[in-house]
């Protein structure tokens, strides 16, 4: 069965520092991978997604993520964090079309990012 | 496009009352999902539809919860009777099955408080 693990429930970084949020997935084949961000009081917004090809994907707001098949990971990174990046971040996995794709995504438990001035 | 629309944005009700949450998906999307988010349990998938047909309702907590999708542009999630433990933020999301990624677009959510 598909599953997603975000090992860090809460992370605090200083403004301007680099950021890496971890995501590990369990799936029998290469899945579709997503990162969503949720600001307080808001719905989830897609940051970036991986389908195939280049394993380093760029997203909105200066975020990027790298797919590492050997480690079953899809970690989110940003070189320099801004105070406005404080939010909750969700990693999600979906099955590829034709591989038992049910159309739904499996979400991790989320990582809350706090940014210190 | 206006995105996924949910109403109401906030709902406060007393225990035992019926609550109805509404969702309008993005036009043309053929998948619709209902999620519940709480501090304790995180983001939970309650039920989802494909072409207005319920596909998986295994996440619906109990018989007090029901969901319908009478047409491609409207869905409801009903709780009857409501209980304080139902207090949460309920999200609706939609996606396009023809888009091979099944990327989901979320609404702003309905914050439900049951007193």
Image: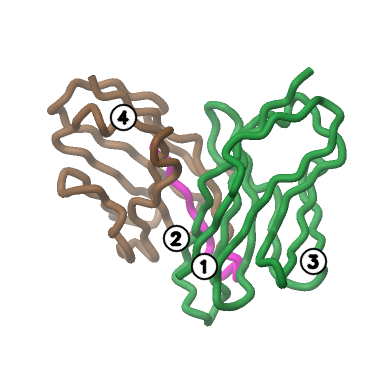
Chain colours: A green, B brown
- Asked where in the image residue B7 lies, by quadrant, the reply is top left
Q: Nearer the viewer, mark 1 or mark 3?
A: 3
Give the mark nearer the N terminus: 2 vs 4. 2
Task: Report the residue at 55% width, 31% height from top.
Answer: A42
Q: Which residues are magenta?
A: B90-101
Nearer the observer, A116 or B2: A116
Q: Position of residue A116 (x, y in %)?
A: 75, 21
Check contact, mark 1 vs mark 2: CB within 8 A. Answer: yes
Q: Which residue is mark 3?
A: A55
Mark number displayed over residue B97 = 1
Q: Position of residue B110 (x, y in %)?
A: 40, 32
Q: Does residue B28 appear in this view?
A: no
Q: Nearer the viewer, mark 3 or mark 2?
A: 3
Q: Which residue is mark 4?
A: B87
| Residues behind callouts 2 and 4 on a single chain | yes
Instruction: Give the CA separation, mark 2 to mark 4.
Output: 25 Å
Q: Nearer the viewer, mark 2 or mark 4?
A: 4
Where A9 sits versus A71, above or below? above
Chain where mark 3 sits: A
- Is residue A74 part of the magenta span, yes or no? no
């Amino acid at each position: 069965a598909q599953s997603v693990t975000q090992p860090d429930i809460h992370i605090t970084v200083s403004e301007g520092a680099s950021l890496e949020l971890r995501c590990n997935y369990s799936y029998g084949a290469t899945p579709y991978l997503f990162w969503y961000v949720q600001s307080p009081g808001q719905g989830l917004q897609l940051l970036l997604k991986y389908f195939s090809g280049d394993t380093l994907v760029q997203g909105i707001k200066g975020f990027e993520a790298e797919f590492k098949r050997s480690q079953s990971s899809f970690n989110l990174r940003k070189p320099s964090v801004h105070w406005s990046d404080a939010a909750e971040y969700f990693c999600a996995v979906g099955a590829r079309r034709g591989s038992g794709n049910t159309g739904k995504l499996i979400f991790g438990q989320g990582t809350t990012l706090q940014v210190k001035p | 496009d206006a995105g996924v629309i949910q109403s109401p944005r906030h709902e406060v009700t007393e225990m035992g009352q019926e609550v109805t949450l509404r969702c309008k998906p993005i036009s043309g999307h053929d998948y619709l999902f209902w999620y519940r988010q709480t501090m304790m349990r995180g983001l939970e998938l309650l039920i989802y539809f494909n072409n207005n047909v319920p596909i998986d309702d295994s996440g619906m907590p109990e018989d007090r919860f029901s969901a319908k999708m009478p047409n491609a542009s409207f869905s409801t999630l009903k709780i009857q009777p409501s209980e304080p433990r139902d207090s949460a933020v309920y999200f609706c999301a939609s996606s396009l099955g023809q888009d091979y990624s099944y990327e989901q677009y979320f609404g702003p959510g309905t914050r439900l408080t049951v007193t």
